[in-house]
Image (cartoon, rainbow, N blue to C red):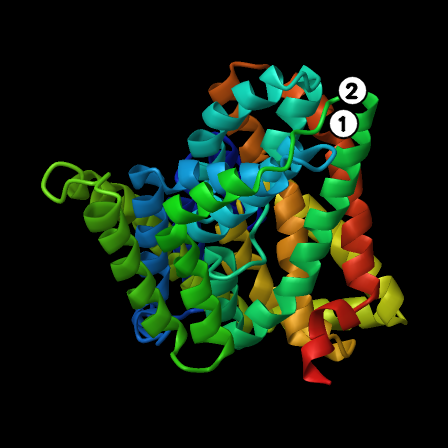
Amino acid sequence: MIIFILIFIFLAILGTPLFAVLGAGGLLASYSADLEPSILIIEMYRLSSQPNLMAIPLFTFAGMTMAAGGGSKRLVQLFNVLLSWLPGGLAIVTIVSCSAFTAFTGASGVTIIALGGLLYPMLKHAHYHDRFCLGLLTTSGSLGLLFPPSMAILLYGIVSGVSIDELFFSGMAPGILLLIMLSVYSIFSAQKFHIPAYEFSPQKITTALRCCAWDIMLPILIFTGIFGGFVTITEVAALTAAYAMFVESVIAKEIHLIKDLPKILIDTVTLVGSILIILGIAMGLTNLLIDSQLPMKLLAIVEQNIDSQLKFLLLLNLFLLLVGAMMDIFSATVVVVPLIMPLAIRYNIDPAHLGIIFLANLEIGYMTPPVGINLFIASQRFEQPILKLFRSTFPFLMIMLIWLLIITYFPYLTIWWKD
């Protein structure tokens, strides 16, 4: 059995598709437990009946539509005129723009590809140091994971059974705190590089607001619908997809329904399909692990060695940072979450708080070798070696680790709305 597990790990390292490795592991586990392999298919059927599952492709389609229709450029223009008069304003524009864009497109590298080519020349032209520019853009590729309608939160809610509405509420304050911390660092860096601030221009703000009026209404629609309790997650996802297509094809006229829509649909199906395949197979494997009492065995081991919530949280963060460095966020969610949920409940950790801790760790994992996807995408986008990019992101990584400790040991930041 151990030999087969080592073989599967080796195949995954060599680049074998993860769903194939997980599927093989599930078949092996069912065979070892004398169970019918059909249990894997049953778990896929249970996944398909999840009421919030439809929100994933709908929100993904909306994000892809915005990316293809130039919504990212209009957002950058708006944030630029709103914030560029501040010290380090252009760096703050980068942070806010990328976080807003990632919230819609998911942490799939689309942000670095779509906004990197636009913002990198702007930062260089403003005389920011090259290493700072690369580190900022590489880091910004995963910002926004804690903001609605983040695909990572949707997936976590489906796998863990925690209310997606609660997760959206819980992620707001930690997400804003991270943006503030990175913005403060950017301000000090701009002063260090002697970057001049631009003149405040009400006229430019009025023009940009007029240009982006329809785009601004989209996040307002989402926040009002979800937090106001007027619509469900799936309903607001459908409204978002329809609204994004209407704005880009009818108002902005950047998307041609015959020429451009097929490619957008193909990109959406490719991304969502890869996630759903991994999710379906992994949930079947996870169900087998639960049937074998693996979570309870882990709980017994942890209880024997960890006697306080403080120590457990420290160990959990170290474990999740390692997971984030080795797996992408979607695979880690379906494989790891069912194993850590019973442990967290045993140590009286709020399920929503656990979700934010989990996602924060995986967000940091996007910048850490050996599988930090942001490093690889940025390396291709900016034609820079991965080692240089990792050194460039190091200051931002340290800030995010401090942020992780804050949200871990001050749970009020995530569950304040429950009081």
Q: Residue at x 62, y 56 (%)?
A: 359
Q: Nearer the viewer, residue 240 or 43?
A: 240
Q: Residue at x 30, y 54 (%)?
A: 244
Q: Is residue 141 visible?
A: no
Pointer 1 residue: 190
> Disc 1 to disc 2, how far (Cα)?
5 Å
233 shown above or below 151: below
Q: Secondary structure at mark 2?
A: loop
Mark 2: amino acid: Phe
253 shown above or below 330: above
- Quarter of the picture containing the C terminus is bottom right
The answer to whether the residue labelled 1 contacts the one labelled 2, judged by CB atoms less than 8 Å apart, is yes
Q: Nearer the viewer, residue 327 or 112?
A: 112
Q: Quadrant of residue 241?
A: bottom left
333 shown above or below 274: below
Q: In the picture provided, is 270 more to the left or to the right than 157? A: left
Q: Residue at x 59, y 36 (%)?
A: 94
Q: In the picture provided, is 103 more to the left or to the right than 89? A: left
Q: In the picture provided, is 216 more to the left or to the right than 290? A: left
Q: Nearer the viewer, residue 119 or 88?
A: 88
Pointer 2 residue: 193
Residue 12, image x and y in percent?
48, 38
Q: How many marks?
A: 2
Mark 1: amino acid: Ala
Residue 21, image x and y in percent?
43, 45
Kindly give the residue lying farthest to the bottom in the view shown.
Answer: 419
Residue 263, image x and y in percent?
20, 38
Q: Secondary structure at mark 1?
A: helix
Q: In the picture provided, is 328 more to the left or to the right than 188? A: left
Q: Residue at x 44, y 52 (%)?
A: 104
Q: Quadrant of residue 370?
A: top right
